[in-house]
Image (cartoon, rainbow, N blue to C red):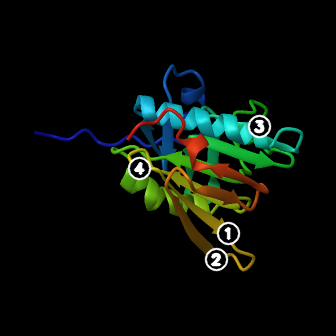
């Protein structure tokens, strides 16, 4: 049995394809990867995060985007779709389409069984290469727990984890707190 050779495309070819596509695809070093759908729990958690962050950042110079906002990571030659993205200050986009953000302040990944390992390791490393990124959240789907990696003044990353519905996650870069009871509203484990 022969294998089909991988076809590598340029970032420009990817964007032209992606902007006309009915489904979302990530771009990793010349390769286009189709993204799978999400579970009910994943969607509820994502919606809860967008709602809570939007309310807490209301009236401030920050914007909260759902998973349809593409983020470019130039140092890794990647275009990806975090579950939630926050940018504070003036958003910078790759081009006039305003659909590829270059300067996120916070990115959030809600873990799925199929992508958890990649999201915790390789993808987390890619995100840390974004100069503007101050915090990266990893939200569990099968337990009430959120991990938060925060960039320190010296460039190192400090990891904190909060567990349990009575816990509160402090987001230093945004100057706000997220009660896990709000993040996991309507989620029964």
Q: The residue tagged with tag 2: helix, strand or loop?
A: loop
Q: Position of residue 28 (x, y in %)?
A: 48, 48
Q: Quadrant of residue 154?
A: bottom right
Q: Position of residue 151 (x, y in %)?
A: 67, 69
Residue situated furthest front in the rendering: 166
**Left or right: 97, with 114 as reference point:** right
Q: The residue tagged with tag 4: helix, strand or loop?
A: loop
Q: Nearer the viewer, residue 107 or 186?
A: 186
For marks 3 and 2, give the CA distance.
30 Å
**Which residue corresponds to the image point at 37% horizontal and 56% vertical from the top-left?**
117
For marks 1 and 2, give the CA distance.
6 Å
Tag 3 or tag 4, which sits nearer the N-term? 3
**In this figure, which residue is indicated by the disc labeled 3?**
55
The numbered mark at residue 143 is 4
Q: Quadrant of residue 76?
A: bottom right
For marks 4 and 1, give the CA distance.
25 Å
Give the foreground label among 1 and 3.
Answer: 3
**Left or right: 20, with 55 as reference point:** left
Q: Position of residue 63 (x, y in %)?
A: 78, 40
**In this figure, which residue is indicated by the disc labeled 1?**
151
Tag 3 or tag 1, which sits nearer the N-term? 3
């Amino acid at each position: 049995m022969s294998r089909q050779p991988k076809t590598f495309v340029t970032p420009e070819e990817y964007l032209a394809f992606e902007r006309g596509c009915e489904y979302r695809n990530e771009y990793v070093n010349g390769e286009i990867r189709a993204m799978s759908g999400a579970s009910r729990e994943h969607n509820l958690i994502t919606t809860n995060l967008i709602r809570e962050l939007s309310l807490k950042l209301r009236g401030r110079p920050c914007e909260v985007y759902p998973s349809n906002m593409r983020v470019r990571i130039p140092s890794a030659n990647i275009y990806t779709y975090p579950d939630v993205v926050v940018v504070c200050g003036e958003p910078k986009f790759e081009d006039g389409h305003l659909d590829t953000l270059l300067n996120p302040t916070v990115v959030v990944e809600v873990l799925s069984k199929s992508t958890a390992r990649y999201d915790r390791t390789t993808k987390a490393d890619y995100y840390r290469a974004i100069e503007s990124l101050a915090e990266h959240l990893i939200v569990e789907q099968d337990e009430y727990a959120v991990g938060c990696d925060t960039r320190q003044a010296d460039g190192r990353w400090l990891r904190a984890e909060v567990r349990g519905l009575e816990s509160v996650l402090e987001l230093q870069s945004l100057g706000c707190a997220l009660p896990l009871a709000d993040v996991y509203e309507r989620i029964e484990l």
